[in-house]
Structure formats: structure tokens, C-alpha cells
Image (cartoon, rainbow, N blue to C red):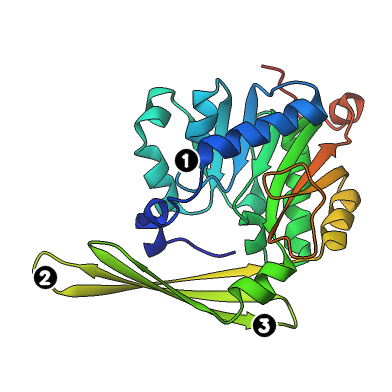
Amino acid sequence: MSGYGDFSQFYDRLMTDVDYDGYADYLLSLFEKFGGKRPRTVLDVACGSGSLCEAFVKRGVDPIGIDASEEMLFAAHEKPLLQQHDVMLLQQDMRELDLYGTSDGAVCVLDSLNHLRDTADVACVLRRLRLFVEPGGLFIFDVNTPYKHREVLGNNAFVFEEEDFVCVWRNRYVSKTCTVDMLLDFFVETETGEYERLTDTVRERAYTRATWEKLLADTGWDPLTVFAHKTTEEPTDTCERWVFVARNNRTVEEATFKGDNIYYG
């Protein structure tokens, strides 16, 4: 799993191009289309700094945010809207997800599942999620595609310059595993006018569409459809991000038989 240490204090400022309100509307439209109704509770897996949780709260949906990064959760805790609504934020590795009850559905966005470095980890997360999403509930997630890793991120470098810091983002692409190792150097201006260098690393791995669909089916999810990012259209060969919609095929009887704590709040 990739960590977000020093990166966390710059994350929101580097992600200003993400329309979280628009993304929340899109996700909720998929819940309504494939689940028949808008969820009351949504588990936001790898919630990061809580911006999507904020967007759900604005729409009357009760989110539960989990993230492995203490620093990212600290940023989420600082958001006034999440404090006002007492949103539950939990520090958990998604592979060890553990809740007291279930949610109507779950989401995982902005390529967070790409941080899982092998299919065994992916399968572990999907099995854990199946326990904490209501029977028949949906899991909607997006992932970077192999095309994006190969052709867009690749061995490229990017520079982001703000008034008080500069970020130099360098990638190393490993074709055998379709993995991109990202080295982020932040040069932050101090009170003395000098610059302090902070470094963080992130690794992402892309899997084929067939691999994602097989992993879902093998772990008890019905893969319903795949869309190009933020659309309801079939992905093209040059699609950079896929959106999967899957249904938890576990029945209430099966869950009750296994003694799981099913919550219908």
C-alpha cells in the first residue's frame, strides 16, 4: 500500500481540478440506476482528506470514511462540515476493514484501489467489503487503466508551482507489472525565505478489465457494468479511468446464518 505522509498537507491543493460535488452526483445517480434508490449510508473507502464525504453530507447521505493514512484523516477531521455532522472517520487499512454494522453501499474513487500491489490484496479488500455492505448493496469504484499507466503516467515528470511551494513529480514505469512508482519532491518556502525539501513516494498498479471482473466474481460480487470515467458509456481503448459497478450477491439468509452483524439503520 502506498502511504500519504508529507503529500497529505498538499493533497487538496494539488487536486483542485477534481469536482467532488459533481462526482458525488454521478455516483449517486449510479446507485439509483442500478440499486433502485439513493443510499442513506455510504462507506467511503480510502476517503483521503474527506472531500467526497463532504459532498455526500451536502446531499443528505451519511458517509463513513476510512483511510490508512493518519495524516490524511487529520486533514479530513479539520473540515468544518464533517465536524458539524459528526461524520465517522476511521484509520484502517482497507485490507483489514472492520465495522460494527453494514452500510447501504460503498465507493472507492480516485484510483485508490490501484495502490494495491497484487491481486491477493485486491481480493482481500473485496471480501472484507462484502461483509460490510448490505446484501444486494452496490460497490462503485474507479481505477486507472493500463493505458493510462503506460501512455500517460509512464516515465514522465510533472511540475506544479504554487506561491509557497513547488512540487516535482517523477514517475518510473515497470511494464512487466504495469506499475508506476511516483517520487514527489515538495520544495516549501520557510519563514526565513529558504526552501525545505519534503519527499514522498506513491506506487500504483494497473490491472486489466478482465482481471477486475474476475476478482469481483470470485469474491462474491456481481460485476454489473463498466463505464468510462464519469459517464455511462462503454470505455474505449484509450480510456484512462474505468468505473465499475458491482452488486453484493450475499443474501440476508446467508449473512444471518454466518452470524454477521447486519444493520438496517
From the image, tell me which residue sits under label 2: 193
* Quadrant where the N terminus is found in the figure: bottom right
Residue depicted at x 62% and y 68%: 204
The quadrant holding residue 31 is top right
The x and y percentages for residue 21 are: 52, 35
Q: CA distance from mark 1 to mark 2?
A: 31 Å
In the picture, measured across the screen, residue 129 lies left or right of residue 208, that is: left
Q: Secondary structure at mark 2?
A: loop
Q: Amino acid at mark 2?
A: Gly
Instruction: Using the image as rendered, state which of residue 259 and residue 87 is in the foreground.
Output: 87
Disc on the earlier residue, 1 or 2: 1
N-term mark: 3 or 2: 3
Q: CA distance from mark 3 to mark 2?
A: 38 Å
Q: Which residue is mark 3?
A: 174
The C terminus: image quadrant:
top right
Residue 139 in the figure: left or right of residue 170: right
Q: How many marks?
A: 3
Q: Looking at numbered disc 3 in the image, what kind of residue is underneath it?
A: Val
User: Does the image show residue 261?
Assistant: no
Q: Residue at x 38, y 23 (%)?
A: 84
Residue 53 vertical position relative to residue 92 in the rendered view, above or below: above
Question: Is 68 on the left-hand or right-hand side of 127?
Answer: left
| Disc 3 + disc 2, Cβ < 8 Å | no
The residue to which callout 1 is attached is: 51
Q: Is residue 158 left or right of residue 198?
A: right
What's the CA distance linking mark 3 and mark 1?
A: 31 Å
Neighbor class of circle 3 (other Cα within 10 Å; few <14, some 14-19, many 20+) is some
Provide residue 45's location: percent of width, then percent of height.
61, 44
Relative to 227, say whether 34 is above or below: above
Residue sitting farthest toward the left? 192
The answer to whether 40 is drawn above or below residue 182 in the figure is above
